[in-house]
Amino acid sequence: MKQKIKNFFRNFFIYFFDTPVFPSLVIICSVFMLAVTADEPVRAKHAYQMSALQYARSTSVPVSSAESFSELIPESVTTSATEIQIYDIVPYYTEEVTEFITATAVPETSTACVTSAVSTTTAATEYQPPVYDYNSLVSTFSPNYYYYLDRMVVVGDSIASGFNVCGYIPYEHNLAQESMAIWNMDNYGFDIGGGYMGVLDAAAYAYSSLYYISVGMNDIFGMTPDEYAWEMRSIVEYIQACVPTATIVVGAITPVSANNYYTTNDVLIQFNNALEWVLNDMADSHVIYFNANDVLCDHSTMTLSWEFAGEDGLHLNAGAYSHLLNCLFNYLDMTPAAEQIQKHEENLWANWW
């Protein structure tokens, strides 16, 4: 039996090499496989520009209308201003997000949603932020809610970290931590997939199309309002230098309860007013000031609304983050944000290939 096997292989190789067709085919196939796979090491070098999450972001675009988005809206959410249950909006990791990744529609463009939007062709020096009314923003559910949520990278302090703690954004999108401030930001670091690095370097590594920055509560005793505002602008400019086409939302310092131990809302308003002026002075549609303070305060007392307050009167409860996101994403629909995000990801995908 062994002799028969030896004879078989000997005869096979004699026939194979005596016939020029077979060796030629082997050589051609080998060259073809090398040509197809030769660029894989090159692509690996650019993995920082196309992580798995970024690939998911690059394959979806904003939805075109509330009608095409209706199947993604949780049953508990309605479009009635009196019936909407904001706290029931489903967090990041739900099945709706998985379904939405495959969406292929275009950004929302209806006049009801972008009545104050500025054309993306408008020069940066001419850009003016839209006039908003948060009472109207909270009365509807943004058709691009999950589109924004899936992309948002959060930078900030313990209040900002609540977006991750409450399950709205994943660990890889969280660059926020307890006690973080502008003055001590260099002491903090994160590993979101590329190794341990500083906060701003991690933000650059994420190379996201949408950032939300919320920091300042821990800075109010060591800075003046103007100093705080310009330091925040320097953070924005650093991220812009690393990710030029990103849309960067800067949230105002959130309000506090009347009986909190830490500070007063009059102080916070001074800091927020300075921040708004400095950011709007940039006249850049990629930099958006979001008045989170106005969203969460009780306008009759100008303090943190009891329905959003944590136990210490300083931090927020879970419902506050749902409310913030709903208002934020409706506000972004009034700006060129959706179109900017889509363009950022189209360029990222094209450059990666």
Image: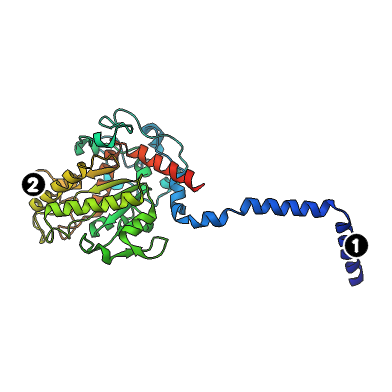
**Tag 2: residue type?**
Thr
Front residue of this view, candidates 148 and 143 = 148
Q: Is residue 195 above or below residue 255?
A: below
**Image quadrant in which the N terminus is located:** bottom right
In the visual, does 345 lie left or right of 140?
Answer: right
Q: Quadrant of residue 314?
A: bottom left
Q: Residue at x 19, y 49 (%)?
A: 252
User: Separation of disc 1 and disc 2 at Cα?
Assistant: 96 Å
Residue at disc 2, secondary structure: loop
Q: Pointer 2: what residue? A: 301
Q: Residue at x 34, y 42 (%)?
A: 145
Q: Residue at x 23, y 42 (%)?
A: 282
In the visual, does 136 lie left or right of 175?
Answer: left
**Tag 1: residue type?**
Asn
Question: Of all residues shown, which one is farthest toward the top?
Answer: 111
- Nearest to N terminus: mark 1 or mark 2: 1
* Percent coordinates x, y for residue 281 in the rendering: 19, 42
* Percent coordinates x, y for residue 187 in the rendering: 27, 67
Q: Pointer 1: what residue? A: 11
Asked if residue 100 can be seen in this view, the reply is: no
Q: Residue at x 38, y 36 (%)?
A: 70
For the residue carrying disc 1, how many other residues have a C-alpha within 10 Å: few (<14), some (14-19), or many (20+)?
Answer: few
For the residue carrying disc 2, how many other residues have a C-alpha within 10 Å: few (<14), some (14-19), or many (20+)?
Answer: few
Tally of marks: 2
